[in-house]
């Protein structure tokens, strides 16, 4: 009989480590969507699925080495994913997808901007916007704001100090807020251009 019956993700992780297949499915469904989004930022949407498969394959093989709660598992499997993604990029002899450098912006702490981007533009477009950030900012935003990892865990994954991760995430969110404002202005402009003449007199 499965050990997972309406329990928390922490309980599911413990049950998974004890060999419960149903618990693994619970953990997978909870962790995989944001993990894949993070991998999309690193390798792009076309290659992320393959890298995610490699990540989960290694996680299953090495699960006996893991001990911890749900947050610990998220950090552990994300570290594996990042290593697999960087290996993938080295095999392809190309750098992570970063189109422009938008550093030097004012640091703010409004993490709600990510939800605004996602709500206004949709998940796929939001991920595309995040991929335009410098790599350090994009990864920090994904780990902190999307995956919900604390700064210490995110820092361990990235090999950076927690304070540096917080700053990178804040700068990335500031940039996303400005990009969202640009999108809103463009939308308003196109709406005005193609607006119906309404009550204007027809000549």
Image (cartoon, rainbow, N blue to C red):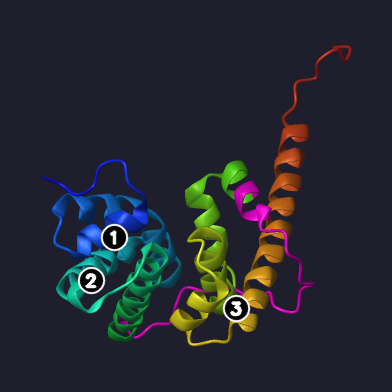
Q: CA distance from mark 3 to mark 1?
A: 26 Å
User: Residue 108 in magenta?
Assistant: yes
- Mark 3 or mark 1, whichever is nearer to me: 1
Viewer-closest of 200 and 42: 42
Q: Earlier in the sequence, mark 3 or mark 1?
A: 1
Say what secondary structure mark 2 lies in.
helix
The quarter in which the C terminus is drawn is top right
Residue where numbered disc 1 is placed: 13
Q: In which quarter of the view is residue 140 placed?
A: bottom right
Say what secondary structure mark 1 lies in.
helix
Q: Indicate left or right for 42 with 166 as reference.
A: left
Q: CA distance from mark 2 to mark 3?
A: 25 Å
Say what secondary structure mark 3 lies in.
helix
Q: Indicate left or right for 184 with 198 as reference.
A: left
Viewer-closest of 197 and 91: 91
Identity of the residue drawn at 35% across and 74% down: 76
**Crowd tier of the residue under label 2, counting other residues whose Cα lies within 10 Å: few below 14, some 14–19, many 20 or above:** some
Residue where numbered disc 3 is placed: 165
Q: Position of residue 133 (x, y in %)?
A: 59, 70
- Mark 1 or mark 2, whichever is nearer to me: 1
Residue where numbered disc 2 is placed: 59
Magenta segment boundaries in residue numbering: 92-116
For the question of whether residue 73 can be seen, the reply is yes
For the question of whether residue 44 can be seen, the reply is no
Identity of the residue drawn at 34% across and 86% down: 93
Viewer-closest of 96 and 74: 74
Q: Earlier in the sequence, mark 1 or mark 2?
A: 1
């Amino acid at each position: 009989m499965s050990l997972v019956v309406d329990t928390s993700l922490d309980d599911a992780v413990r049950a998974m480590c004890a060999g419960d297949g149903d618990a693994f499915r619970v953990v997978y469904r909870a962790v995989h969507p944001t993990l894949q989004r993070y991998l999309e930022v690193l390798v792009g949407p076309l290659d992320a699925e393959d890298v995610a498969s490699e990540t989960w394959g290694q996680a299953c093989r090495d699960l006996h080495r893991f001990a911890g709660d749900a947050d610990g598992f998220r950090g552990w499997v994300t570290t594996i994913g990042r290593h697999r993604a960087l290996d993938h990029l080295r095999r392809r002899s190309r750098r992570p997808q970063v189109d422009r450098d938008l550093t030097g912006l004012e640091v703010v702490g409004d993490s709600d901007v990510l939800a605004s981007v996602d709500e206004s533009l949709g998940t796929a477009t939001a991920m595309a916007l995040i991929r335009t950030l410098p790599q350090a900012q994009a990864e920090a935003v994904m780990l902190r704001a999307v995956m919900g990892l604390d700064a210490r865990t995110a820092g361990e994954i990235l090999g950076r100090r927690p304070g540096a991760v917080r700053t990178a995430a804040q700068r990335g969110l500031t940039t996303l807020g400005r990009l969202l404002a640009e999108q809103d202005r463009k939308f308003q402009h196109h709406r005005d251009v193609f607006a119906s003449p309404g009550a204007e007199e027809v000549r």
